[in-house]
Structures are given as structure tokens and as C-alpha cells.
């Protein structure tokens, strides 16, 4: 296995990255991930209309200098609008433009976007064409797909039409989530589908295939690469409240299995909780940061030996003083953390994701 991953002219020094996660993967979460060894991040899906109209939507796409390399992920329904959105992202300094054909959130006004474009391959192709034309070779383009709209033979035909169009249009790569759009987040990601894909389309330098689905701990990244042959792996729900997954993946790459198995200590957890909170305050202000950090705190609690109590503590947090009180109560003394690598039941059963740019 090679540690390097190529996305067009971009070289990544490790075969994994932080996925787009609507409602979570803002600049604060991405910076924390990078400080733990994540080599590349994708934004949450950014609606073309928000980018074109400016205002709040555009603000959420602003980039920090330390937040590179990064893909800006676009979602939209009309080729001309999504192409205009791509130009906005280019102007903002994004290193890769990614097109979302995977989001299962409901259709808007009967118009397809995200994963719903998987069932209309000609429309999907027109969108892919418009984006790559607008980008004009300035940066690599990629696409995020699901394995199909559903389990029908027609959905499979549509998938291959879209995948082949992506290659023919000159995209640098695709990341495929091994669940169908209809499946949302229920049931397993189909890694056999990913294996079939790399057997059929893999092995070329010019087109990088990434896999997504059911990556809960660092070892899952390498398991997916071994079992499916994908070039790189998307870490999604498994890195919410768990940036150590990236440190541990780097340790596995270096052959250090002991470091890869060592959970973060209480003080390491406290340092990251404080850091993440501060980055979030810088970005959103104290009020919104407090609200957002509650859901992160709940996910971080899995690493604490008193996980359930800590989780209850974070659930009650309504502002900075309450946040500090939870830290003082549970993170004041150092000690070993716990693995907490397996999916929490509520994570594994997550059946929905928020509307893009819901922050
Ligand atoms: C809350 C939530 C928000 C998500 N938002 C996005 C998104 O904006 N863009 C995207 O490409 N995928 C998004 N995804 C999908 C993930 O990137 C990933 O493909 C999916 O969770 C499967 O990986 P996992 O089983 O390892 O979590 C989201 C998933 C969740 C649970």
C-alpha cells in the first residue's frame, strides 16, 4: 500500500481525509483534525445559491490560511448556477472543487440535487460538465457519489453512466459512499460494491477512487483499503469528537501499533476540548459556539472512563460557564482515557443529516 494519494496535481501524504459533515465540519473541526495529522479536508456541502448570493452562506465558506489543502463541496440543481458557485470557490482559494451527488436530504421544490441526481444521470452529467468547464483546469475537480439511488438494476446502470462520465470529463477522482440514497445511513456500507468498482475502474494514475462508509476507528481505514482496493478513505462519523483517529492512522502507517491503540489521556482530551471550543468561538461567537460544542462534547465523552456521566454533563451545557464547569468536574485530573472507538449506538443508527449550511 502506498501512503501517498494523488488528486490531480495535488499530492496527499496519507491515504485518508476528513469528510464533509453538514452541521459539524466547520473551520474549527477541520483545524483540530489537521493538528492531529489529517492531511486533507472537504467542506460540508455548500449550496450554489448561497455562494452566488453572498451573505451568511458565503461567510461559512471563508477559509483560514492553515486550512489547506481543502476541497470546497458544491451542491445544486442547475448547471449554470453550480458553475457560478464553482467560480466563487475558486476565487476564495479552494484547492479542489468537489461536486456532491450523494446527499440524501429531501428534494427541494421537486428539483433534484445532491444524491437525487443519481437517478437522473443526464442531469448529473450536465452538472459535472458545467463545473469542470468553469474550473478550467485551475484546480482538480472531484465528485462524491453514493453507490446508487436504490437497489434497482436501473440505479446501477445510472451509477455507471455517471461514474464513466466523471472519468471522461477529466475529473481527478471520486469518493463513493457504499450506501444507496434510499438507504440514507441505515444498514452497512457495501464494501463489495467498492471492490467491484476498483476492479473495473481502478489502477490508473489519473483517476483516484476513494471509499466511504463505516469507518469508526483508525484500523478501519486500512481494512477498507485492503478489502476494497480504494486509493484513499473518507473518515466521517468516526472523527466527530475523535480527532485522534488521524493520529492513530498516522501511527499505523508508521508501523507503531502501540501508539495506534493508545487512547487519549484525560488531559489530552481537555486540551482538545478547550482548543475546539476556542476555535469555534472565534468563528461563530460565544452563543452559537456553546450550542454547537454541546453536540461535540457528547461525542468526546466516549473517551472518558465516566462516559455516561460526562455525556449527561455536556447535554446540559447552555453556555461557556456550564462548559467550563463540565471540564472542571470531569477533566481536572489526568488519567488514562478509554478507546471508545466503536460506533456509539446513536451514531451507527444516524438516519439523517442536517440541511447543508445549517449552522
Ligand atoms: C451529520 C452528517 C452530515 C453529512 N454531511 C455531508 C456533507 O455535507 N457532504 C458529504 O459529502 N457527505 C456528508 N455526509 C456523509 C459522510 O461524509 C459519509 O459519506 C457518511 O457518513 C458515511 O461514512 P461513515 O459511515 O463512516 O460515517 C454526512 C453524514 C452525516 C452523518
Image (cartoon, rainbow, N blue to C red):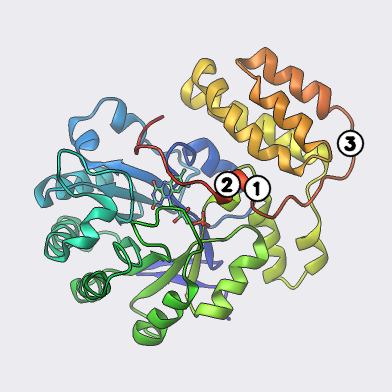
State left or right for residue 35 relative to residue 40: right
Location of residue 351 in the rendering, given as x and y in whole percent from the top left corner: 46, 46
Queried on whether the Cβ of the residue with tag 2 lies below 8 angstroms from ligand 1, the answer reads yes
Residue drawn 68% across and 39% down?
A: 300
Q: Quadrant of the N terminus?
A: bottom right
State left or right for residue 277 relative to residue 201: right
Q: Which disc, if any, is residue 334?
A: 3
Tag 2 near tag 1, CB within 8 Å: yes
Q: Quadrant of residue 222?
A: bottom right
Cα–Cα gap, marks 2 and 3: 27 Å
Between disc 2 and disc 3, whose residue precedes? 3
Residue drawn 52% across and 44% down?
A: 30
Residue under circle 1?
A: 344
Residue drawn 57% across and 55% down?
A: 38
Q: Nearer the viewer, residue 251 or 213?
A: 213
State left or right for residue 261 relative to residue 227: right
Determine if residue 303 is in view.
yes
At numbered mark 2, what does the secondary structure look like: helix, strand or loop?
Answer: helix
Between disc 3 and disc 1, whose residue precedes? 3
Location of residue 239 in the rendering, given as x and y in whole percent from the top left corner: 59, 49
State left or right for residue 95 relative to residue 47: right
Residue under circle 2?
A: 347
Residue that protrudes farthest toward the left in the picture: 80
Amino acid at each position: 500500500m502506498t501512503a501517498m494519494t494523488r488528486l490531480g496535481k495535488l499530492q496527499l501524504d496519507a491515504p485518508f481525509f476528513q469528510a464533509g459533515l453538514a452541521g459539524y465540519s466547520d473551520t474549527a473541526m477541520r483545524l483540530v483534525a489537521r493538528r492531529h495529522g489529517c492531511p486533507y479536508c472537504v467542506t460540508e456541502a455548500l449550496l450554489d445559491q448561497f455562494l452566488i448570493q453572498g451573505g451568511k452562506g458565503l461567510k461559512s465558506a471563508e477559509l483560514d490560511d492553515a486550512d489547506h489543502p481543502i476541497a470546497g463541496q458544491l451542491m445544486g440543481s442547475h448547471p449554470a448556477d453550480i458553475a457560478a458557485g464553482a467560480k466563487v470557490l475558486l476565487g476564495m482559494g479552494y484547492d479542489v472543487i468537489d461536486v456532491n451527488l450523494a446527499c440524501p436530504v429531501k428534494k427541494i421544490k421537486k428539483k433534484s440535487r445532491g444524491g437525487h441526481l443519481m437517478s437522473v444521470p443526464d442531469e448529473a452529467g450536465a452538472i459535472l460538465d458545467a463545473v469542470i468547464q468553469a474550473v478550467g483546469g485551475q484546480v482538480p475537480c472531484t465528485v462524491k457519489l453514493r453507490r446508487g439511488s436504490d437497489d434497482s438494476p436501473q440505479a446501477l446502470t445510472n451509477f455507471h453512466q455517471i461514474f464513466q462520465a466523471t472519468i471522461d470529463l477529466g475529473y481527478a477522482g471520486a469518493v463513493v459512499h457504499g450506501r444507496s440514497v434510499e438507504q440514507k445511513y441505515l444498514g452497512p456500507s457495501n464494501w463489495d460494491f467498492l471492490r467491484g468498482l476498483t476492479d473495473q475502474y481502478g489502477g490508473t494514475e489519473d483517476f483516484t477512487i476513494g471509499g466511504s462508509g463505516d469507518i469508526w476507528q483508525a484500523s478501519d481505514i486500512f481494512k477498507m483499503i485492503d478489502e476494497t482496493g480504494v486509493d484513499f478513505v473518507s473518515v466521517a462519523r468516526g472523527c466527530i469528537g475523535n480527532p485522534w483517529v488521524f493520529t492513530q492512522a498516522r501511527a499505523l502507517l508508521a508501523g507503531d501499533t502501540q501508539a495506534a491503540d493508545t487512547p487519549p489521556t484525560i488531559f489530552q482530551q481537555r486540551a482538545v476540548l478547550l482548543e475546539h471550543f476556542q476555535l469555534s468561538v472565534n468563528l461563530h461567537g460565544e452563543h452559537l459556539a456553546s450550542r454547537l460544542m454541546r453536540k461535540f462534547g457528547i461525542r468526546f465523552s466516549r473517551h472518558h472512563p465516566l462516559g455516561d456521566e460526562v455525556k449527561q454533563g455536556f447535554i446540559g451545557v447552555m453556555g461557556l460557564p456550564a462548559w467550563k464547569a463540565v471540564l472542571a468536574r470531569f477533566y481536572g485530573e489526568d488519567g488514562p482515557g478509554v478507546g471508545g472507538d466503536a460506533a456509539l449506538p446513536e451514531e451507527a443508527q444516524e438516519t439523517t443529516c442536517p440541511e447543508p449550511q445549517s449552522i
